[in-house]
Amino acid sequence: YKSLATFPPCRGCSSYLVEPYIKCVECGPSPFLLCLQCFTRGYEYKKHQSDHKYEIMTSDFPVLEPGWTAQEEMALLEAVMDCGFGNWQDVAYQMRTKTKEECEGHYMKNFINNPLFSSTLLNLRQMEDHLSRTADTAIPFKPTDDPPRPSFDSQLSRDMAGYMPARADFMEEFDNYAEWDLKDIDFVDDDSDILHALKVAVVDIYHSRLKERQRRKKIIRDHGLINLRKFQILERRYPKEVQDLYDVMRRFARVVGPIEHDKFIESHTCAKVYERVKRMREDERRKRNMLCDILQYIHDSRACQQWLHKQAAIDAGITPVVTTIITSGRRSAPPLNLTGLPGTEKLNEREKELCQVVRLVPGAYLEYKQALLNECRRQGGLRLAQARSLIKIDVNKTRKIYDFLIKEGYINKA
């Protein structure tokens, strides 16, 4: 079932159609419409055949609530447009099917106080415009909803600074007495040039004051500050550090739009998160390097003791006295046991042998290997000096890793 706002003539008898009537689905592009009498007679004309598929066109079905058909809804809207809002006696007289009380109650319930019509349709249009301007939003933001309509002098009305949604004005506007300067001005023909120019200047000043009033109202509306309670609820959803940043940067919201302001706040928050994650990543890298250092001296008690004293001094913020770790030189360290170390399964036999001889844990070797491969691909080749600048470990270990990767064909010399 479908509804039509206008009723064209029947293609068979040329009489004006009355619902319900028939529309041929197969004929077009202009609609081929028939009244019920012509349809029952099997009227055919040119390409139209009586066995074509058809639709029954009627608006005799409820839309918003039972007891009100779509046709009556359209009749109510037309009557309110013709007779004026509030003139319910004349509206009911024009409709003929509903009483004055029914017309008023239905209209107020479904077209004034119904949030579906008062705000949702408007917000959909605003959201479409917003999405067309920006595809990425840092913080989900919705334009201010149609604000509540509290009774005069209620607590909510005071919280909204006396805002009147129906008029989009405040009970007391910014620069509320700006109009007083104009109340006694009257332009007459016998004004002198100086007096006329003075009056024009007063009007120009008044216009500038109106512009400032509108600018402030636009900031309040765009940032959703009219419905203050809802704004505060949304703001409390942010983490504490974001709320504090909002309080500090609130004064700057007037120079940018709401979306740009939220992105600005979010970018600062993301920057703090980035710095925190960066510090964590650097700590993890230092721990891996520390493990490599420990494994170098773990079999030499003297060197290990010197290394521990050095690290304790560094952790205490003191310049370590021991700057060079001296090994006893009694014997070379045995090959590193790779059993159970993370990353061992990713190595081939020759790489395992290298890690055992060099005493390098597999995870660190894989990280160094990837860094050298990336730099070699970027430069088209790699020198030993470049490898040493990339890998901050013992230079002898770096040379062994570098020579091994050259020999195995992973990288090539510059």
Image (cartoon, grey):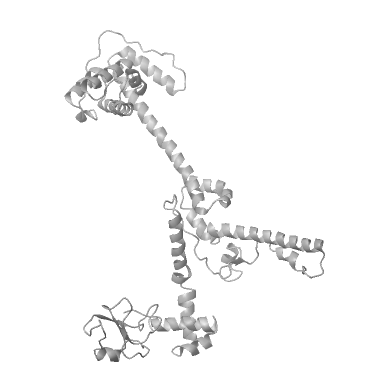
Measured from the top left, where is residue 390 in percent x and y? 35, 23
Residue situated furthest left in the rendering: 349
* Whether residue 156 is situated above or below residue 132 in the rendered picture: below
At x 53%, y 88%, the residue is: 90
Residue 49: give x, y in percent of width and height: 23, 84
The C terminus sits in image quarter? top left
Task: Determine whether 344 is above or below 231 in the image.
Answer: above
Q: Nearer the viewer, residue 119 or 11?
A: 11
Task: Name the residue nearer the viewer: 264 or 45.
Answer: 45
Instruction: Estimate the x, y position of residue 155 in percent, counting from the top left.
Output: 58, 65
Classify residue 412 by image quadrant: top left
Whether residue 291 is situated above or below residue 76 in the rendered picture: above
Across and down, in percent, residue 121 comes to: 44, 68
411 on left or right of 283: left
Residue 193 visible in the current orientation:
yes
Quadrant of the rendered structure where residue 273 is?
top left
Is residue 68 something one can see in this rendering? no
Q: At x 39% / y 81%, what residue is drawn?
A: 70
- Most extreme residue toward the front is 46
> Which residue is rendered at x = 46% and y = 60% of the image?
129
The quadrant in which residue 213 appears is bottom right
Q: Is residue 179 left or right of residue 195?
A: left
* Closer-to-camera residue (78/12): 12
Q: Which quadrant: the N terminus?
A: bottom left
Count of marks, rendered view: 0
